[in-house]
Amino acid sequence: MNSNPYKSAMEQVEFDKNFEAKAADIMAKSVQKKKMGFFACKLAFCAVGAAACIALAVFVVPFFFKPPVTKVADDPSMTASAVSDTSLSETSIPAETTVPENRLFVDPLLYDQGGMGGMGVPVQGEVLMSAELRAAVDDPANEGLWFNVMIGVLPPEQYENSCDEFVYNGRTMAEWEELYILVPGIYSYSRYNEEHGGNITEEEWLTRQEEAVNLHAQENYDAGKTEYGDKLGMLVFKAQENYRISECERLKAQGYDMFIYGSQILGEGENTCTQSSLAGYLSIDQINNFSINPACGYALEFDESAGAAPVLYAVPAPSDSTPTEQDLLPSVS
């Protein structure tokens, strides 16, 4: 008999008024403990000017963790359903999402891998999935359940204006990054050797470190990030938001339960843009056969952000082999 080994076990919770600030602080600290995956946060660190780069340093999961709030749009009339009637350049949508009734969701904590499973960078037309989400989707026990998924979208402008390929002071940012990790105190010898094939002697490593110092690698890397951000960062960020909105509408038209939430304004003065989160309540089939725009790249992962609407998780029912109280009593010879 094929029975679903899950049962409802969690009710929606009510958050106190300080929850978002507290959660953002906790998440930022937690993120710092995780090994960087996906882009290794490249655009996040190459985004805008020096001050904004500091703020963006917590943008690691998923396509940029939400930045600190400069100001939050508070137009209550703006919802995901109203996106198509607004300008795509800067749209602000508050976190107003409704969880469909009678839907049970997979609990991402059951598949947590400690943040060690990076996704890499999708090419245009490709969909990548976090290791946690892939494990959950492939688990037969989750048949019929739903997934609260955050969707990262790489727009064409991001491929056309790669931070890695940006040239500063005679070298690409990828080349400066390779030198930067040789700066004393950035990487240990063992880590550097492991990530470079395992055949680097300690003497070679020290020679390369000396070269990095002589080339002022850290100063050039930091200055290159700032120049990239000043010239191209905002262009890419605005393109990301435009495509989040247009992709939300496109997917909704195809039957996906999609929404945008958590809009925040990034930057200050005239050099600002809106950043938000694109998410959806997806089935296994929708995830495995995710509809794409060939011009974009996609990264899918569980939505565990502080701004996500609480959902009803399903939890595994006890198996038939669960020991009883009698089983746990010591045996008497």
Image (cartoon, helix red, strand yellow):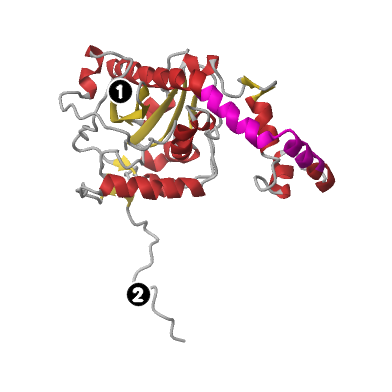
Does 212 appear in magenta?
Answer: yes
Q: Which mark is residue 326?
A: 2
Q: On the rendered structure, is 235 left or right of 73? A: right
Q: Residue at x 76, y 36 (%)?
A: 214
Amino acid type at mark 1:
Tyr
Q: Which residue is mark 1?
A: 256
Nearest the eye: 216 or 144: 216
Tell me the chief SS of the magenta region.
helix
Looking at the image, which residue is at 34% across and 36% down? 147
Q: Quadrant of residue 321?
A: bottom left
x and y percentages locating residue 327 in the rendered image: 39, 73
User: Vertical placement of 158 versus 56: above or below?
Assistant: above
Quarter the N terminus occupies: top left
Whether residue 191 sits left or right of residue 132 in the image: it is right
Instruction: Report x, y in % for residue 224.
Output: 59, 27
Q: Secondary structure at mark 2?
A: loop
Q: Name the one closer to the observer, 129 or 69.
A: 69
Range of residues picked out in magenta: 207-229
Q: Secondary structure at mark 1?
A: loop
